[in-house]
Image: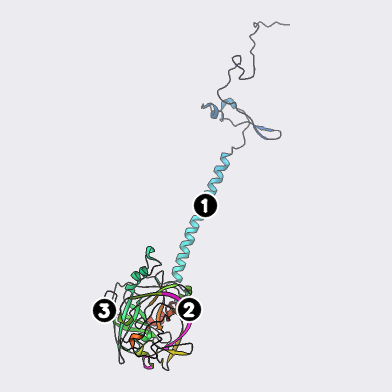
Amino acid sequence: MTESQRPSGEYPMYPSYGNGDAAYPPPPSYQPVQPVAMGPGTTVWPAPGTADAYTGGGHGGDGLHGMPQPAPGPSAPRRRVRRPVALLAAVAIAAAIVGGGTATVIGQLTDNGTDSTAGSVIPGTTVSQSSKGTVSGVAAALSPTIVEIGATSTAGQSTGSGVVITSDGEIVTNNHVVAGATSIKVTLSTGKTYTAEVVGTDADKDLALIKLQGASGLKTATLGDSSRVAVGDEVVAIGSPEGLTGTVTSGIVSALDRDVTVAKDSDSGSSQEQGRQGSGQQWPFEFGGQQFNGDTGESTTTYKAIQTDASLNPGNSGGALINMDGEIIGINSAMYSASSSSSSDSSSAGSVGLGFAIPVNTLKADLDTLRAGNSS
């Protein structure tokens, strides 16, 4: 047996790491790499190169060379997941934008004024956000769009109101305001006057369209949607009662779909209705089988009206009934005066809170007919 020539004690001792000064080799300055437990009977060591994470060195993990390749770390799958999610979100946003744009284009193509019976709003002057819902705000914004109409006929002089719907001077009013007129003078809220001609009339709906001569740059009213009107809604009426241009009154919608009957032409007594100042004559109409404010004559027409308690007086005829967003919801056409049937004293006549307006959707459905110059 051969004896070892190594002096006693020269064999290295390998106590557990971290047992003090006697430990050899010295403990590492980092936490030793631990195996990754993957399941029963399976152990995976980190991949080569991961030693740098512990040592900070650039040796490419040579100390772990030959170790089995580890399973992918948890951060890699998260990166791969986030990219598709972000991509899908971007695609969804783009689709929404394109879809919204498509819907807008389709809306514009289908709402170009050819189908005014759909309840679409025809834009014009609006009330500022800070003034919406106030009578003063509605009055300030819409008064410039309401005009006074003076019509001269063989029966005399009459006064009514109208609503500007185009910047070059198309104005909507009642048929009975201009029926039989030989000349028409229109006064704006600024006091400027124009002559006007009748473009078209519809006696069955008590509507008429007139056009100012040489006008441009006028403020136009927004035509709203009367199908959305509800009983109790606040409203504002603007017109020229008794020739008092730009008079503003307010109230609520007190009823809907009232069957109101008015005269169709000036030969049936409506010539006396046209707001003749100082005559004491009112707006003759029929409601519930009874006649009010005089005789409507033999030639009449009936329409479904919006009822309001906003004060209306002779001269308001053809003016605007407006909601609190500043949208025209009706054209004022008739009012009841309790004293007019028994007295000729104009000082005792006046509104008692029963006024009627033609729904604006009726007007919008009739605009093409009026613009075509048809008269009935």
Q: Which residue is drawn at 64% across and 19% down?
A: 16
Residue 261 is situated, as x and y percent measured from the top left of the image, at: 44, 87
Q: Identify the residue position indicated by label 3 in the image.
A: 193
Relative depth, front residue between 367 and 112: 367
Q: Identify the residue position indicated by label 1 in the image.
A: 89
Q: Which of marks 1 and 3 is in front?
A: 3
Q: Pointer 3: residues within 10 angstroms few (<14), some, or many (20+)?
A: some
Task: Measure how far apart labels 3 and 2 are at the Cα level.
Answer: 36 Å
Q: Identify the residue position indicated by label 2 in the image.
A: 255
Report the colour scheme. Answer: rainbow
Relative depth, front residue between 281 and 318: 281
Give the mark nearest the N terminus, 3 or 2. Answer: 3
User: Residue 115: in sight, yes or no?
Assistant: no
Task: Measure how far apart labels 1 and 3 are at the Cα level.
Answer: 60 Å
- What segment carries the magenta color? 251-267
Give the mark nearest the N terminus, 1 or 3. Answer: 1
* For residue 161, above or below residue 154: above
Q: Which residue is drawn at 53% across and 52% down?
A: 88
Q: Is residue 260 magenta?
A: yes
How many numbered marks are there? 3
Give the mark nearest the N terminus, 1 or 2. Answer: 1
